[in-house]
Amino acid sequence: MIAFARAQAAKQARGMQHPQLCLDAVQAGVEHGGLAGITKEGECFLKAASLDTHKGLVHIFFAQRSTKKLKGVTDVGLKPRQLKVVAVLGGGLMGSGIVTALVLAGVEAILKEINQKFLDAGLGRVRANLASRVKKGVMSQAAADAAMSKVKGTIDYNDFKRCDMVIEAAIEDIALKQKIFADLEAACRPDCILSTNTSTIDINVVGAKTRAADRIVGAHFFSPAHIMPLLEIVRTEHTSPQVVLDSLALSAVIKKTPVVVGNCTGFAVNRVFFPYTMAACMLMDMGLDPYSVDKVIAGVFGMPMGPFRLNDLVGSDIGLHVGKNFVDSFPERVYIAKMIPLLNQHKRLGEKTGKGFYKFDGKRRASPDADIAPLVQESRDAAGLFKGTHPKMGPQQIIEFIFFPVVNEGCRVIAEGIVEKPADLDVATVMSMGFPAAKGGLIFWADLVGAAYIENRLKEFASMVGPRLAGFFKPCAYLSECAASGRKLEAGVPAASRL
């Protein structure tokens, strides 16, 4: 029985020592009696408390509870307004997920679409989300029916004077979003919060054709919106503290952990992780097997999936579109692989088309696909990084090659004041990208590794790839300053915040 428990713990908590320490205490008590078990428990507790895992989990526990406190918002005597009616524009996967999250929390929701066909499809998705919960035994049919009764579908703005908040979840098209926000300004009350679920577009650009900048905010959910626990609240220099406070209050109602961030390309999470897939594609173009890379990042480091599998989940079309924003904004530190455009050209968009880097069966189970080999070779030929043999890199080197550029971008986000405190970035990376909570989040983990070591390794990687791509690995000023002074990255900077 103990052996079975150890095997299960090893499988479900890969690389974790503390579950095994718990079982050590149990085994001692079973084999040698209660007193021996209690004695062993004390020994194991002391060992567990000294682990980096313990430090990481304690850090993320308290960090998660501190994201709701924001200087100039929650400490100035403002009271949150109750948002009784929230409208969502767009009934796709994201919009329907947001509506589901609202009605599960008892919030009245209005779902608007551009025509009846799209509206029926959006309402059907909400109904399917609720039905899935019933099937899993999470809620009763009566509760699902009650939740569905809180949704009203519409194809016009006639009911929008009732709305306390609107969440736009249309496609990532600037002109379309600007028109929607101009329409919302006319259709809604002057105290209605106007929010956008955009994942990358500058919030000021979205609201550029309105005179409502003080009540415009980003409400960036992660897909599926009714399941993923993070809500990125994007504040511009114009957004009023009251609107931010109300958005924080809504996050509590719908049981999301909020992180308030500043306005920039990709905001916090998507910006910090843009080097993730780029670095993985660089390794592939250098000759490494993409499936082996995924096994290291998921199986050894502990991410839910590797970067290539994640690309298939998100979709190569989305990756190409979002990636362009980062190429335009940060041209000096991106890697443009030919592989992502090739996947789009060959309609290998991932799960949605049944094939991407992987191939998928009817239950969306992924397996390696030999048919990808010619595309990989074409990408390698275009990159010119593969010299007949790939660099000899073990699991640790692969992890560093992929994650140290992510840490570097996280340091830029801290230095620019995009997050109020580095711990917020730890929470955001754990609750959106699935960064291992046991490592404490991206920046906490980086401090465990050491800023000086990370800086040196980035310089070595820059030398490895040559001058043309060295910018991708160039350590930022904040990382270098911390490396030189011995200061923790988690300490943050005293510079003015962008929030």
Image (tube, grey):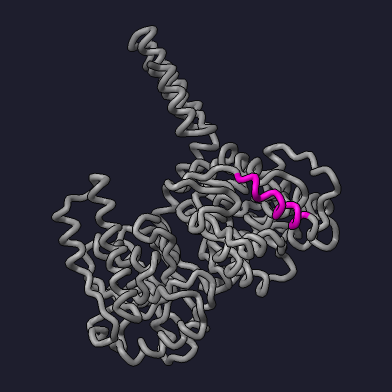
Residue 166 pos. (x, y %): 33, 78
Q: Of 487 and 384, which appears nearest the observer?
A: 384
Residue visible at 38% across and 8% down? 31
Q: Is residue 377 magenta?
A: yes
Give the quadrant of residue 335: bottom right
Q: Is residue 183 above or below residue 380?
A: below
**321 with respect to 467 (left or right):** left
Residue 447 pos. (x, y %): 62, 47
Q: Which residues are magenta?
A: 369-380
Q: How many marks?
A: 0
In the current view of this chain or complex, which residue is farthest to the left?
142
Residue 473 pos. (x, y %): 74, 57
**366 with respect to 487 (left or right):** left
Residue visible at 25% across and 54% down? 131
Q: Is residue 290 above or below residue 39?
A: below
- Tell me the quadrant of the picture where the N terminus can be found: top left
Residue 229 pos. (x, y %): 39, 56
Magenta region, main secondary structure: helix
Q: Is residue 163 visible?
A: yes
Residue visible at 44% across and 86% down? 213
Residue visible at 74% across and 60% down? 472
Give the quadrant of residue 268: bottom right
